[in-house]
Image (spheres, rainbow, N blue to C red):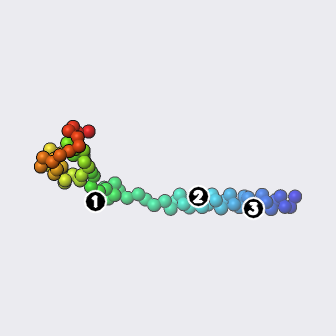
Amino acid sequence: MGLLRILIAGLLLVLIWRAFLTVRDWWRQPQLPDETESEQGVNPLLPCSKCGTYLPKEGLDPDGHCVRCRDGGTTDRDEPL
């Protein structure tokens, strides 16, 4: 009977310790940065409206064409996606 009490006390101690660690980790969760801060420096890629090649926004002309399509280069496709 004494051994059973020791095992139950040990199990209870382990459960309390795990609960403590879980609460501590939950309490210390890092705060996520603001979306504006995390998106700074991100340059989304946009597809060329003629050939579909993905380029940074600065790599496309106002019509949405890349340099190759703007200069009359050959493309694999004739229609945009």
Looking at the picture, which amino acid does disc 1 mark?
A: Gly
Position of 2 relative to 46 (above/below): below
Looking at the picture, which amino acid does disc 2 mark?
A: Thr
User: To which residue does mark 1 refer?
Assistant: 41
Q: Residues within 10 Å of mark 2 (few under 14, many from 20)?
A: few
Tell me the quarter of the image containing the C terminus.
top left
Q: Earlier in the sequence, mark 3 or mark 2?
A: 3
The answer to whether residue 65 is visible is no
Give the Cα distance between marks 2 and 1.
35 Å
Q: Secondary structure at mark 3?
A: helix
User: To which residue does mark 3 refer?
Assistant: 10
Q: Earlier in the sequence, mark 2 or mark 1?
A: 2
CB under 8 Å between discs 1 and 3? no
Q: Residue at the spot x=76%, y=60% of the render?
A: 9
Looking at the picture, which amino acid does disc 3 mark?
A: Gly
User: To which residue does mark 2 refer?
Assistant: 22
- Nearest to the observer: residue 8 or residue 50: 50
Q: Earlier in the sequence, mark 1 or mark 3?
A: 3
Q: Secondary structure at mark 2?
A: helix
Asked where in the image residue 1 lies, by quadrant, the reply is: bottom right
**On the rendered structure, is 22 left or right of 9?**
left
CB under 8 Å between discs 2 and 1? no
Q: Closer to us: mark 1 or mark 3?
A: 1
Q: Residue furthest left?
A: 71
**On the rendered structure, is 9 left or right of 57?**
right
The answer to whether residue 72 is visible is yes
Give the Cα distance between marks 3 and 2.
18 Å
- Nearest to the observer: residue 74 or residue 60: 74
Percent x, y for residue 38? 34, 58
